[in-house]
Image: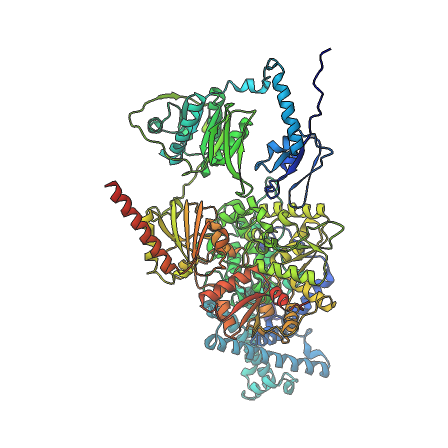
Amino acid sequence: MAKEPKKIKRPRGTVRLIPGKCIACGARCQAECKFDAITMNENGEPIIDLEKCTRCQRCIKVCPVEAIEIYYTPEEQKILDELAKQKAAKPKPEPEEEKEDPRLAKLKEYKGVWVFTEHTEGKPAEVSWELLGVGADLAKARNVELCSVVIGEKVDHLCNEAFTYGASKVYLVDDPVFHYYRTESYYKAFCYLIEKYKPEIVLIGATGLGRDLAGAVATSLQTGLTADCTGLSIDDKGFLLQTRPAFGGNIMATILTEFTRPQMSTVRPHVMPLPAKDASRKGTIIREKVPLKEEDIAAKVLEIIGDEKLDSVDVAAADIIISGGRGMCNTENYKILQELADELGGVVACSRAAVEAGWMPLERQVGQTGKTVRPKIYFAVGISGAIQHLVGMQDSDTIIAINRDKQAPIFEVATFGIVGDLFQVIPAITAYVRERRKQKAGKAG
Amino acid sequence: MTATVITFIIVLILALAFFAYSCYQRFGLVLKGKPDNRFNAIGKRLGNMLFYAFGQRRVVKKPFGINHFVLFWAFMILLISNTEFLLNGLAPDTISFSLLPDGAYFTLALIFDIMSLLALIAVVLAIIRRFTFPPPYTEARSSDAFIILGLVAGLMIAFFGMNACEIAAGTDRAGVWMPVANWVASWLPSGASGLDTGAQVCWWIHAVILLAFLNYLPYSKHMHVLTSIPNCFFKALEKVKTQSREEFKKGNTFGVGEVENFSWKGLFDSYSCTECGRCSDACPATFTGKPLQPRLVIHDIKMNLLKNADKDGHKELPLIGVEGEGSVKEEVIWECTTCGACMEVCPVFIEHVPRIVDMRRYMVETKAKFPEELLLLFENMEQRSNPWGIAPAERTKWSADIDVKPFEAGKTEYLFYVGCAGALDARNRHTTISLAKIFDKAGISWGTLGRDEMCCGDSLRRLGNEYVFEKMAQANIKMFAEKGVKKIITQCPHCFSTLKNDYRQYGVELEVVHHTEFIYQLIQEGRLKLKSDTDLGKIIYHDSCYLGRYNGIYEAPRRIIASATGSAPLEMERNRENGFCCGAGGGRMWMEEKEGSLINVARVEEALKKQPDTVCVACPYCMTMFDDGLKDKEASDKVRVLDLAEIVANALPDE
């Protein structure tokens, strides 16, 4: 009888929390543990009962910040290495066929990346073209077609524009019943198209209209919808990875729609870059007739109340905002903000105090009773940061606060803060930007 | 039966018939209103009627009101005289006071004579007033006003004339007992032949004026003569602190867009309005030059009801949105801060605020037409359960540096309901932290709901978004029940009033107390001792509407300040029940003031008149309003704003 190598007991190791790493995501580890080995302490951190733990490591995998680890002492590690050596010496068995989940088989029928073209009576919303950019990447990764969906009346021109932004096909539903957007007509048409042509991915801009439509479509089709995505990509299994901030922005969550199709996402305007336009591109238009009658739709558009202030500055649309508050002291001083805005390509806004004092017009007001803005950069200059103002700008990507009061609440939300005299800081920034510009121009020329 | 009597019978029948018809027509309109039970607790209601209507309680709070008191009682007493007068006209020889024994007859004669004189003087004073120091609105000098005053004067003069002629003719033995009539008689030639005719003429003048006056009542603002006493009977038994619930069922109407959708009491209110203008005088919106004038709102409701009287179904004159009499302009509806000052001073207990909220409900729930700024508020409330749309996880940020325990049923006695401002507003967090210190010092068993706390929904209810409010209230009540919450201390008076008074409509009785009351209780019980040497300079106290007028808390905060500083605080000119609103209630915190001057600045100016060093408030809205107002007046480096809790925390003993 050949002497078999001594059966060494595989060390179990210790599953433990790495101190300080837990972000209290909401007890995902506890939810994942099938052996009830995890309880949460009052800080939302896991307490692992090693008696119950089977070392299955599911909690380690599900933790979004890798705060749980399995730890082996040096002795245990030696044993593990020994076992690994033994395993390497053994002949390898045939790899088992990975059994495919039967649910996934049905999903293979769905192919194609669709982007909804939003428009108001024929005027397209730019986000529709932005989504064609990221849509093209997704379609390429999946090796499928990128298509646009256009629903409206007399909107052929939108099809052509979609081609120039990268769509190879447009599904067009053109009928008077779709002249104005109404939830009922649009979602029914969209669902009709999706059920007929089975796209695997549908992207819609996260505008008011888009959110309304996306929710209705997803509910009707009983499929998953992820709103306000900041990132979209395809994983190695071909699933759409939808990334968005969660838990008040404390973490980035990546969401999968595993078992239903289409995978639907909405993306905010100005998050994805506009793709290059190619005027020569052409594509196929597939015209569809959706069986909808005006009489069947309960909602009627009676009146459209327009925004009369069409030609004044819309601070809500700007990417860079330089906003001045009570600290500005008078109207003339806003000139220094305007200079900086000109250098950076931004617009000047203000807090309510400035409007009340008569320094700036009402349409520039940011805040609870003014506009809500989400620019890439928000300069809060001489603004204390009272909650009524924060409401209007707290979702800005980067907040730069300049205030001479270091206790000002604005510093609690600012990404960068300067405690100083704005009348010195702002001109200094402007001068610096100007200088850098000159240098760059000098280098290029 | 003489020709005179027959004529009079005809005249009387016609007059009374027409009067009955007018009343039937007018009050028939009131009955079109929605049901409202105002017939319970009859005893208490009669008491109210006696005290407020007959006692003219609120009328005399203003000095010139005494004039009306006199006029009212003169009328009441002269009712007896006038009843006899009319009956006497029917049966001149059988019904007359003169048939009574001398003692009785002379006493009555004297009383009636003096009363008529007082009435006449009152009327003359009223006429003079309208020319010298009139109420600030033009209708005070309208033809309606002068007609009434003229008629009353005429009535009195005719009365004197009639008696004077009879005295001079020797047909009235009470002569000396009617001093005024007697004096007039002395100017008349005694025994002259024309005297009988004179008496007759005066008699007829008196009769015609009386019946004309009676018939004029339903067509003028003097309808209040008929309705004000019943209106006091029908007045709300408890102070009006909430609005009624709505039933969200298919087929119901929501809010009031047509005048008949008001409760019948609301319509009756509009008939009872005497157009005295006390409400508008007290209103912060009116004071700062805004179109909202409570008196006009009530007037418009009445005119709308009357102008649409014959049109069942399609209404010609809409209740809301049209310029002119009988329609309430949209912006007027939104300018109300629900401070309740109007209801506090109204002598006939008209309920202005519920009417305005009724119309707001219509605008929000049926028309979806409301100021733009509210869209963000409604969204934030629905989605994040706070007015600023901040992530609920941030609600525990205020307690980051201190030890705060979660509320546990059976273990914790008091739930400290922090409120949205208390948790999320940077300035107001200091108040919350101060309260935590105070509770710990007093050894109170307290805990919070932490991130689970949701907004009480006050702003939404006052703004007319009743549907969302109902959802929020039910969610809160469910949570309180699940967590076993019984006693609640609130930081904010709006949370306090809503949890205490509004949530009761959902069948739950919560023991809710505001932090000022609670601190006072602790001091009384000896559980909290304060150093009494806090030096914050001169402190002036501002009464919050939802603490003061709504819930009657006036003395506790003042006594606390006295405990902490050794002396009572300074008082604003308008204090306690007459306190002037900071301008943020009724959901106005979330809106812009588009017309007139700013309410909060007006209040700050009032405070600054007393040159304080510190303004003491007990409400997060008031705090924000004063903060901003002082900055606007460039006084924030001279005057600071502190919550009562902060003052108390400052005065806690050191160990």
- Which x, y percent locates residue A258? 56, 26
Residue B371 versus residue B348: which sits nearer the camera? B371
Quadrant that contains the C terminus of chain B:
bottom right
Residue B77: in sight, yes or no?
Answer: yes
A358 to A99, vertically: above or below: below
- Protein image colouring: rainbow
Give the tally of numbered discs.
0
- Which x, y percent locates residue A180? 41, 34
| Left or right: B599, with B8 as reference point | left
User: Within the image, what quadrant is residue A3 found in?
Assistant: top right
- Residue found at the far left of this picture: A445
Residue B414 versus residue B40: which sits nearer the camera? B414
Residue B525 versus residue B122: which sits nearer the camera? B525
User: Within the image, what quadrant is residue A47 found in?
Assistant: top right
- Residue found at the far top of this picture: A1
User: Within the image, what quadrant is residue B176 found in?
Assistant: bottom right
Residue B12: in sight, yes or no?
Answer: no
- Which x, y percent locates residue B353? 57, 58
What residue is shown at x 65% (from left), y 61% (from top)? B437
What residue is shown at x 48% (from left), y 65% (from top)? B629
| Left or right: A113, with B585 as reference point | left
What residue is shown at x 72% (from left), y 68% (from top)? B524
B136 to B394, vertically: above or below: below
- Which x, y percent locates residue A105? 55, 17
Residue A282 versus residue B38: which sits nearer the camera? A282
Quadrant that contains the N terminus of chain B:
bottom right
